[in-house]
Image (cartoon, rainbow, N blue to C red):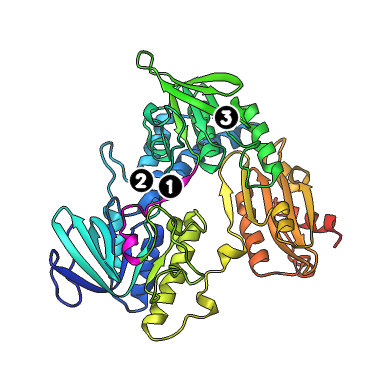
Amino acid sequence: MSISPSSSGEAPGSGLRVDVVVVGAGPPGENVADRVRKGGLTCLVIDRDLFGGECSYWACIPSKAILRPIEVHDAAARMPGVGTGPVDAKAVFQRRDRFTGFDGHRHDDGSQVQWIEGTGSQVLRGNARMTGERRLVVEGADGTTTVTARHAVVLAVGSDATVPPVPGLAEANPWTSREATSSEHVPRRLAVLGGGVVAVEMAQAYRGLGSEEVTIIEMLDRLVARQEAFAGEMLAQAFADAGIAVRTSAKLVKVERTEAAGDVRLEFEGADAVLADELLVATGRRPRTTDLGVDTVGLTPGRYVDVDDWLTAQGVDGDWLYAVGDVNGRNLLTHMGKYQARMCGDVIVRRARGEQPGEAQRARADRLGAPSVVFTDPQIASVGHTEDEARAAGLSVRAVEYDIGSVSGASLLADGYRGRAKIVIDEDRKVIVGATFVGQDVAELLHSATVAMIGAVPLRDLWHAVPSYPTISEVWLRLLETYGL
């Protein structure tokens, strides 16, 4: 990939000087570039892989493209008079490939490159390493380019899936999220190691696509353990109803892929072995800082880059190094990475003008509570503290729950609707500090909870936010009535 000459007239292959260098062209990197360009600064975006990042090709976009047809199918099955047949896996994969620009041989990131260049930024494909303050060297197909940033370097390199050190696990060639979201076939038997978001979403996706046996294996005592306990319980029941086997509190001790049959055999302490055709490992992620040259500026390779609320790297003098998205470890969610990027870009522009960033540029949303959705059936939508987290934080709290299925809008949405809502209230301030919704289509309830929480809207004012009838938003009214308003 060639790049445009820099504003100082230097040619590719010799040296480039720009105001801002962004390493990583996923959604956070793209948003930083857009923001600093709107602020009048020049920008270079570097990536060694596909422009568009993990989200576009192997994470959010393909996983939701796979899950949505299954969600529609299952919703139709709960509606009398709507015929449903089996999900056409081939058609689902073809639709996914349209979203990811995959033509059967490779992904095409041309539209992503075009978007970045449309902001007025330059692009460069290659392996970037920092060599000192505001300096990088980029090894690409066309040779080596040295790059100097006048104002800022932003690390937006993301994270990689991890494989636990279980004997035989790495040698069994397991899937990670990349293989699970890009596979062209549906294994007859799938084992899933982990109980977090990727694990539960892909377990349900492949069961819906036609896998005959799906077994999800979690070392903790429940699925989605960071959510309210009832969320994991309801999801486990839904999995059981869908024919997905769930093992919790499971200790995996050995994995072996047999050459003859091609089976993957998982052995456990005190439990029967599991045989599968494919094994998905979804147990965590690590930042891509191992080969980035962070040691040349005083940081430790392989670790998350610690940042303050202005996304400035801590432990590096001069306020010139920033980190957004997965690489800083604050919230491994695309929308939060994009939020951080917008804040970061504004901070860089203000500092370049000789101004100090203010409260409007402080990334505080992910401190107050990051909204998240687990796109299973039922969906799990949450923001802020769980009840246990709020109590651990020293808040005086009261929690209120309500059966969403008892709301008129929910009973119209689906026969036999099963769902639950919970809000966590700070009794001293009388505001919501956490909310969790479980059920069909509850993702659309989440933004109202986020606005109420981030805005610290008093409960007495929420009482006057009248939900439309008949919608599942009526659950807000029922929650407030249950609380006592």
Q: Was residue 433 drawn as part of the magenta stretch in this picture?
A: no
Residue type (three-letter) at the residue carrying disc 2: Thr
- The quarter of the image holding the C terminus is bottom right
Which residue is label 2 attached to? 100
Which residue is label 3 attached to? 251
Residue lying at the far bottom in this picture: please name it: 354
Question: Rounded to the nearest whole Å, what is the CA distance between mark 3 and mark 1?
Answer: 32 Å
Residue type (three-letter) at the residue carrying disc 1: Ile
Q: Quadrant of residue 200?
A: top right
The local secondary structure at tag 1 comes to helix
Residue type (three-letter) at the residue carrying disc 3: Lys
> Can you tell which mark lies on residue 324?
none
Residue lying at the far right in this picture: please name it: 484
Which residue is label 1 attached to? 61
Residue 189 horizontal/vertical position (percent):
48, 22
The local secondary structure at tag 2 comes to helix
Question: Of callouts 3 and 1, which one flags the residue occurring earlier in the amino acid sequence?
Answer: 1
Q: Quadrant of residue 390?
A: bottom right
